[in-house]
Amino acid sequence: MDNKEIASLFQDIADILEIKGENVFKIRAYRRASSNIAGLSRQLSDIYHEDPSEVSNIPGIGKDLAAKIAEMVTTGHLEFYSELAGEFPRGFLDLLDVGGLGPKKLKKLRDVLGVENIDELEKACRDGKVAGIEGMGEKTQSKLVQEIVRIRENEGRFLAGTAGLLADEVISYLSEAGGIGKIEKAGSLRRGVEVVGDIDILAWAGEPEKAIERFVSFPGTSEVMARGQTRASIRVRGACQVDFRIVDKQCYGAALVYFTGSKQHNVKIRHIAKKKELKLNEYGLFTAAASGEEKPVAGKTEQEVYKKLGMSWIPPELREDRGEVEAALRGELPKDLIEYGDVRGDLHLHTVDTDGQMTLEQLMRKAVEKGYEYIAVTNHSKLVRIAGGMDGEELLEHVDDIRKVARKFRQLKVLAGVEVDILKDGTLDLEDKFLKELDIVVAAIHSNFSADKETQTKRVIRAMENRYVNMLAHPSGRLITKRNALELDMDRVFRAAAENNVMLEINTHGQRVDLNDAHCMRAKEMGARFSINTDAHDTAQMDGTGLGIATARRAWLRKKDVINTYKFDELKKALKR
Ligand code: DGT
Ligand code: CA
Ligand code: CA
């Protein structure tokens, strides 16, 4: 277990102890330990394996907690937690994931209304019983309903970031065996949707039975849900479903169009085919039966199918029936749509100097490896205590460090920046005299999530009006499976971004994807520009730009809409305020 997981488990324990009504000092000890662990610059497992006695020298970690940490880093498990969790009915502790529902409220809901799971919570809200509880009210109740709606929407669905990695694993497992002609992702995953229902994989193969046999024996398969000669479905690790289909080489393109979807897009192009007296299905494009014998017109490649339908090839991310078919028929698809290789640098990155896991040197080495032209180091400001946020003086020293390390990487331009917190009233967590020393200022909200729409909108706009702010990070504030977006008048936010030349982030973290595609489309209409950033805390996360580019493509963004596709000189100009 890494520090993040251990810190989060200690938080959970504190929550559970609070629900149980245990001693406040004990609860506080877990919270303090959790926050200290989150701020550590070294992994507990490394510390432990070097010298076990060192663990209890960490502030806030006594003998008892040190023993628990030892158990976690050696076994990946904590018996004490399992026992605690076992005292509650199934589904009850899941309620802690409902945004806005801390242990205090949860305890009350259980004591007063007997709520033990999400269904009961939903019923209690809909019956108006929650509003009647002391300290909750109508507003809490309606927020809880919104949270439950979000949770239900995502039930049985998976973050594309996670599903994409699994899909890649399955594909390379299948390819390793040989005998596969072509293989790729289809469905929502290929269209770059941020949350997917399942994984679809399409291939052509010389001996389909063999490929199917290998597929159903993918390590991690917990269930073979369906199995035929050319198609099969498995469930992996008790969670995500993977559909695999094998088609003939001759109709691979038509099948890929069909299984990429979306359904609405398919309906639209089938209709176009009909108008041309053709028939389109997963086997190909044919002359319609009415005109006699069915003859194949196209099918081997997607390009060919679209061409015979009288349009140019449509990028998968656009296939949502949002006007792409009409545009393709007119030959008016965006010509300079952003491409996967277009990003020249990442402008939102964290190091061990606050809550990241990588050193400045590791970050820069990784950036060079990736062929980046520039990067920005943007650690947290002081408000985010749990992340070891810096005050102004600490930040200036950090800037010196950044510049010093950067000298070793001559091929890389390094921007010394900060991710500064937007305070409750829209002022910033650091004074202008510090901000003006930086190459780039990224502003973000990490507190007061529940302010009403007017307050929240004014807060964000005020922050963007600060002349040192260059970018608004994860603007909507949503965490797909954990928290609804902030209440914001997005049109006003986007307009202010355009007017103040503040870039809007497309944060590529799988849990965020923020802004999302619909927001990007709207913001572009209002004249805003964007930056696709990973917000990486370790070097592996720096590889995550793909999901952000997919999102940008889904929003029809062109290269020029996204500033971190610019050459460094142009980037500097774009950041000028
Ligand atoms: P998901 O899995 O819910 O995230 O979304 P998709 O789009 O991946 O949907 P899925 O896995 O059910 O099917 C994959 C593609 O296959 C879908 O995008 C279009 C095609 N498809 C599946 N069923 C139908 C259908 O009944 N009609 C049409 N036109 N296409 C279908
Ligand atoms: Ca799918
Ligand atoms: Ca499917």
Image (cartoon, grey):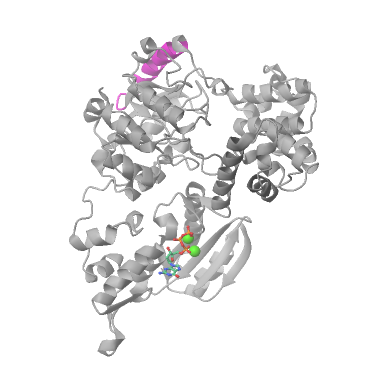
Q: Nearer the viewer, residue 267 or 295?
A: 267
Point out residue 275 in the picture as x, y percentages from the top left corner. 25, 75
Q: Is residue 74 visible?
A: no
Nearer to us in this view, 218 or 270: 270
Give the answer, above or below, for where 304 lies relative to 485. below
Highlighted magenta segment, given as a residue range: 394-412
Looking at the image, residue 108 sits to the left or right of residue 202; the answer is right
Task: Judge whether 310 appears above or below 53 on screen.
Answer: below
Provide residue 371's location: percent of width, then percent of height: 33, 36
- Asked if the magenta segment contains residue 405, the reply would be yes
Q: Is residue 488 highlighted in magenta?
A: no
The C terminus - image quarter:
top left
At 65% from the left and 26% from the top, the residue drawn is: 34
392 versus 77 height, above or below: above
Name the image quarter holding the N terminus.
Answer: top right
Q: How many marks?
A: 0
Q: Nearer the viewer, residue 178 or 385?
A: 385
In the rendered image, the residue lying farthest to the bottom is 292
Residue 284, horizontal then vertical, whole percent: 33, 75
Residue 466: quarter of image: top left
Overall secondary structure of the magenta stretch? helix
Q: Nearer the viewer, residue 86 or 274?
A: 274
Question: In percent of the image, x 29 and y 41: which residue is there?
Answer: 524
Indicate the position of residue 98 as horizontal and vertical percent values: 62, 41
Q: Residue at x 49, y 74 (%)?
A: 230
Q: What residue is drawn where x is 32% and y is 20%?
A: 439
486 relative to 572 in the view: left or right: right
Mark yes or no: residue 95 visible. yes
